[in-house]
Structure formats: C-alpha cells, structure tokens
Amino acid sequence: MSNFDLSEILGNPEYVAMLLLGIKMTFVVAIGSWTLAMTLALLLLGLRYAPGPVGNAFVTAYVSYHRNVPTLVQLLLWYFGIFTLMPDPVTFWLNDHNAEAIFAVIGLGLCQAAYFSEDLRSGMRAVSPGQMEAARALGHSYVSAMRFVMVPQGSRNALPALINHSVSLFKNSSLAVAIGVAELTYAVKEIENLSFRTFESYLLVTVLYLVFSLMIMALGAYVARRADPVRSGRA
Amino acid sequence: MISDIIAIIRDYWLLLLIGQYPNGPLGGLAATLLLSILAIAFAFPVSIALALARLSNSPFLNWPVTALVYFTRGVPLLMLILWGYFLVPLVTGANVPSFLTMLVTLVVYQGAFLSEVVRGGIVALGHGQMEASRALGHSYLGAMRYVILPQALYNVIPSIISVFVATIKDTTLGYVINVPDLTFAASQINNQLLTQPFQVFFILAAVYYVICWSLSRVAIVTERRITRKRAGTASQATAKSLKLAALTDQPS
C-alpha cells in the first residue's frame, strides 16, 4: 500500500467502464426490486384489512417467512432451487434475459415487501381509529375514507421506517453477487482481480455505496419534510 | 419431493450440524451459532463504549463514532466482509481462518448497530436519572455504571435479541469468503448431489426459519414482560413519549 494510486483504476477506461456497468446493474436491481416490493407491500396491506381470517393468516405467514430466513438464503433458494423446477420454455426464456438479475429482483423484492408492508401497517395502526369513524360519519365510503383520510396519515407515519428499509434494500442489492449478477460488488471483485489494486478498488466502491446510501437518506428526509412540514419541523 | 428431503437429511445431517468437524474446521449449524454468539458477546462491550462515546460532549469521541455508525449504515455488509478479508490478514500478518475474519467484521458491524440500540435505551431513560445520581454524589462514570446502564441495558434486552437474530442471518454472508457455516454446508451438499438444489436449499431455509422464529418469539415475550414491569415502576406516559423521541432520531 506504499504506492497508493487511485489513477491506476480511474485512469483506465476499461475499469471505468466496468464500474459504470456495475453501478447501472446495482440500480437496475435496486429500483426493480423496490418497485416490486412496494407494489406487493400495498397488496399485502390490502389483504391484511380484507374481511375474514384467510388474508390475515396468509400475510402473517408471508411476513414471518421473509423476515426469519436470511435474504441470501432466499436468493439461493430462488436462483438454484425454484429456477430448476420451472418448465423448460420458461427456463430458456429466462436464460436469454439475464436470469440472474431477474431472480435477484424477485428474491429481493419479495423479501423487502414483507418489511415494507409491516412498516405501512404500523404506520396505519398509529392513526387513531377515531379518524376512520369521523370520516365515515362525514359520509365517506370505506374506500374513500381509506383513500383520503387513513392512507395519507398512515403513509406519513410510516415514512421514516420505509426510508430506512429502502436504504437496506439498496445495500442488500450487493447480495446479488452471490448468484452472479454483474453489479457493483461483482465489478469491484473483477477489477481487483485484474489490477491487483485491492485497497484502491475497495475504497472506490465503498465510497460509491456510501454516497448513494447517503443520497437515499437525504432524499427520504426531503420527502418526509415535504409530506409533513409541521411535524418534521418539530422533530 | 418430501421423501427426497428426508433422504437428504438422513444422509447429511451430521454435515449440516457440525460440518467436517473432527477432520476439518467446525462447520454447519454449530459454526453458525458459535459465530453469532461470539459476535454478539464481543460486540456488546464494544457497543456500550461506542454509545458512551457518541453521547459524550467531546468532539474527539463523538465525531469518529458518529462517522463509524453512518459508515456501517451506508455500506453493505458484504463490502465490509470483503474489507475484512483483505485487511485482517494484512494487519495480523498471519494466514487467518475465514471464520475469524467474519467474526471481526461482524463485531465491528453489529457493534455499531448495537451502539445505537444502547444509546436509544440511555436516551429513553431521560435526564432525571443522571441528574439525580449526580446530585447524590456519583461521578459521571459512577452514575453510568450503577444507575443508568443497569436500567438502560435491561430495557433494551428485546432489541439485543433482535440484533442477535439479525447477526444469525448476517452470518450467511460469510458464504462469499467461504466461512464454513450452515449455508456453506448446504452448498457443499448441493455440489455433491447436483440434482436436488431445491430440496437442499429448502432444508437450509427451514432450519434458519426455525431458529430465527423461535428467537423472535423470545424477544416478543421478553418485551411484554419488561413493559409490564416498567408499567409498575415508572410513570408510563413520560416513559412512552421519551422512548418515541429517542427512536425517531436513531438510525435503522
């Protein structure tokens, strides 16, 4: 390490191209799984509130599985396990369309949906039931009371937890390297192998991850301020 | 399918349980649990020191620890493990087993996370406890040692159990540097069988599920007991509002 030299990596167009591809893939996986997770989380939340015990039991089981099994194991189960059980045409199609990335998005998205739906649910539970009763008394239907009264307040309550879990989703996108997705962590290992500049390449990618995470946190804080100027001013 | 799973468990239960232990390094479930327990045991004192440093007024103590907490919050654990894999042998100058590398990384990572938990517990107690013990003649450290920490640490026991569960789940990442843990054992079995990856990884997921689910239950039951106990001793309204205030400015 006596000759620390970042330009060995940043001056080499080949390594820079690998880094950029890695960043792109990290964002594809992170944004793809975030979208999937948020969509599923809203569906799960809907199921929680559905009448009858079946929906609730299903969501409880779903959340329990995804929170108690390590994310990496879930990814391995998807990529090495469930992938092989699929019918041949599906397997061929997936292999042609970057199966690793698709399974990373599915695995991470399904896993994070459990966390997001719990965040939303605790946010909703923090809204007092009187709000619902008042909205119904004022003539709102159940759905419209949900839409205009409950969900806006509940999602605002859930924002801090959602932001934290969005950051951890971004960080978890690095797990995709275990099933061979060519994202940022994969890129750094490649660059390290080719350049023998372990310290420099690790430092570069660590700083990149840190900057992106802090940007997500800052974005989250901005959204929280916009959504609720009064309360964030107080806190 | 189910018969396959039973057959795999029958053939490989010893490998899943202790790895190749008498003939090789301790592995399997035993290694996973040992790694998690050691990581938490070492991270605990570290986290108390970090929490006290972060609460102190001295910028020399406060700033580096705040930076460390944000660093561990913003960088994937996988990246820290790669750092450990590179730095630990460099610092010690010896050929270190990957188990030890993983342990060091987990202590740093979970130490930073636990320090936030401990800090939350201390802040949630409120100023009154500290002021009262200082007024009674305790020094700052004496008050921490005999008044603040015993209460704060007792109140955060459920969170410590949650961090322990998270640690068990995090040990799986040792997979990338070939730590011989449960996940490693499962992938070894998968490499031998080749034809039944779903069954093998299903068993793996089931084992983790049973362990982490039971521990989460323990955390929930403990939390209920502690809440009941506190409701008897402390005025609940102030305790509750202080706890919320402490939790909102705490990362993760």
Image (cartoon, helix red, strand yellow):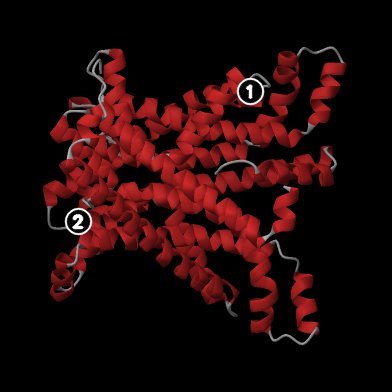
Examine the rendering and report whether any part of residue B98 can be seen: no
Residue B180 falls left or right of residue B146: left
Looking at this view, is A22 or A5 the one in front? A5
Circle 2 is placed at which residue position? B197
Crowdedness near tag 1: few (<14), some (14–19) or many (≥20) residues, C-alpha within 10 Å? some
Is disc 1 placed on a helix, strand or loop? helix
Q: Which residue type carries mark 2?
A: Pro
Residue located 61% across and 41% down the image: B250
Is disc 2 placed on a helix, strand or loop? helix
Residue B170, image x and y in percent?
A: 39, 40
Examine the rendering and report whether any part of residue B199 can be seen: yes
N-terminal of the pair, mark 2 or mark 1, is: 1
Residue B72, image x and y in percent?
A: 46, 35
Residue located 70% across and 52% down the image: A232
Residue B175, image x and y in percent?
A: 27, 40
Q: Which residue type carries mark 1?
A: Leu
Looking at this view, is B200 or A133 the one in front? A133
What label sits on residue B52 in the rendered view? 1
Residue A175, image x and y in percent?
A: 32, 47
Residue located 85% across and 23% down the image: B132
Which chain's residue wears label 2? B
Q: Quadrant of the N terminus of chain A?
A: top left
Residue located 14% across and 75% down the image: A89
